[in-house]
Amino acid sequence: MNVEQVFGLLPVVMVVCVVLLTAWAMVKTVRYMRADKEMRRSIRQAVKIRMTWTRLAKMAGLSVTDRTPPWLSSLTTGTNAPEPKPRELVPVIKTQPDQYGVIVHVKLLPKVGIKELQDKARFLADAWGCVRVAVEAGKPGLATLRAIRRDPLTGHIQYVPTGEPPADLTVWPVGRDEYGAPVHIELKNKSGAVVAGGVGGGKSNLLTALVSYFGPSPAVQFAVIDGKVSDAAHGDYADVLPRVFAHAGHDLREANALLRRLVKLLHDRATMARTVLGTSNMWNVGPSEQWPLVFAVIDESHTFFHDHKGSDKETRALAALAAENIRLTGLLVKGGRSVGIYTVPATQKATGDAIPTSIRDVCSAALSFYQRTTEASVAALGDDIRNWPDMDPINLQGSQYVGVASMAAEGRPGFVRVRTPYLDPAHAAAVAKLTAHLTQDPTELLANLTPPSLRKDEPPEDDAPAAA
Ligand SMILES: Nc1ncnc2c1ncn2[C@@H]1O[C@H](COP(=O)(O)OP(=O)(O)OP(=O)(O)O)[C@@H](O)[C@H]1O
């Protein structure tokens, strides 16, 4: 093909380009026209973000200077060509509007990483007219900015239990994240979850929903220790009590007895696993009616772990019991994974003695409703929350955030914010009543499976309480 022929094709190429551009513009216009009011605002906002990004990123210091000349310039070395100027690079972005604002995918650069974006999140939020900009880690080398004009987590959602057993017993669905995607906590081969948060944050609602969700399955059993009331039958768990095989109130001795009972179950199961299941890890075969997954909920756990100071006999006995409770709970969390005991310590008091770090750090998941101070957030979620300031549950204060928690994201760095659904206590009570016949003591179930010669009647020496 000679030059004249190439020039002859030019009009055709131009027509094709114009047709493609027109089609693209029409698709965009139709999409805009069909969108509702909020979506249109987000589309306009996304255009503004893209158009102003280069300038804004430089103003915010989210740029890096590349002093290395591009390789093309090396071809001209030795000529009179001027020295190439250093280039100021800004991260490449892609935008995606949705009902609540704009999701901005950012390709990170050397020296413009997650930390730098977090530092400038407030600046970007102001420039983009958003209530907040959340920074999340994406795939390696990428970050996601959530520019929120209207926080999706402030909209309430309701959980109406179906009364049907869940199809999957390996995950605990806890709610939806700010993208509307389901969020769950892994149970398979996991030890436990810390649930923390200020008064009235939504902890008990989440935990009663746990009973309502798994309650219809005969392969799940529940034990509840509630430190808020003298008897769990009078507290937040009263509605679901028919589906709970063992419960205790705030009395330290009572709680200690139940914890010892659970630790004995743990030891018995560990001893019997190979004989009964043919494997030392229950999760290799999955929970069953005879060997159910056991949730051990310890609500207001600070009641049982709190250090009692004083030299009188009673105080010393209480202090010994508290120390013993910490040790027993630690044993449950550390040893429960493979035998199918999942421990959930929950507390409104986020300090080191409410959920000792020795327990918190071995729990595989942590979730916190609102907190008043970052120190409290750290006590609940670990030190890493300091690296994710926009995910800190201190941002969840206010009635619109009741039921919203920040959760350590499993399998990836950082945290996710999750809106847990509200469960009407009447629904919880109805499911518990309907499924009460499924309540079984796992110790008795195990005894039915266990040849007497292999059964242990007493917990091993080292599990005896220090004071009782
Ligand atoms: N997910 C939710 N969505 C909407 N409202 C909720 C949600 N969870 C709880 N609430 C409301 O907040 C109130 C307090 O919830 P809940 O008892 O679960 O809090 P809590 O954290 O257990 O409080 P406390 O520490 O005092 O025991 C509930 O009675 C309910 O009205």
Image: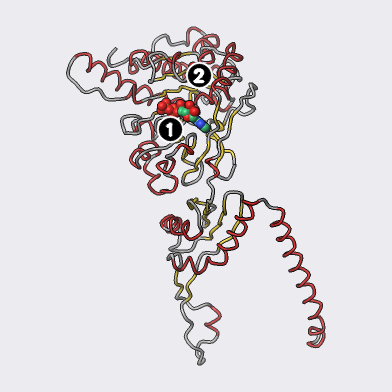
Quarter of the rendering containing residue 357 = top left
Tell me if I can see residue 72 in this picture: yes
Q: Could you say which disc has been placed on residue 178 in the image?
A: none
Q: In the image as oriented, which residue stretches furthest toward the front? A: 37
Quarter of the figure that contains the C terminus: top left
Name the spot of residue 302 as percent of width and height, x first.
34, 26
Residue type of the residue flagged with mark 1: Cys
Q: Nearer the viewer, residue 23 or 455?
A: 23
Residue at 69% x, 57% y is: 32
- Image x and y of residue 318, in percent: 27, 17
Position of 242 relative to 190 (above/below): above
Residue pushed farthest top?
A: 452
For the residue labelled by badge 2, is the local secondary structure a helix, a strand or a loop?
A: strand
Locate residue 158: give its quadrant.
top right
At 59% from the left edge and 29% from the top edge, which residue is drawn?
A: 159
36 shown above or below 202:
below
Marks 1, 2: nearer the viewer: 2
Q: Quadrant of the N terminus?
A: bottom right
Q: Quadrant of residue 290?
A: top right
Residue carrying label 2: 222
Alpha-carbon neighbours of circle 2 within 10 Å: few (<14), some, or many (≥20)?
Answer: many
How packed is label 1: few (under 14 Cα within 10 Å), some, or many (20 or more)? many
Tell me the kind of residue under disc 2.
Answer: Phe
Dot 1 corresponds to which residue? 363
Q: Nearer the viewer, residue 398 or 445?
A: 398
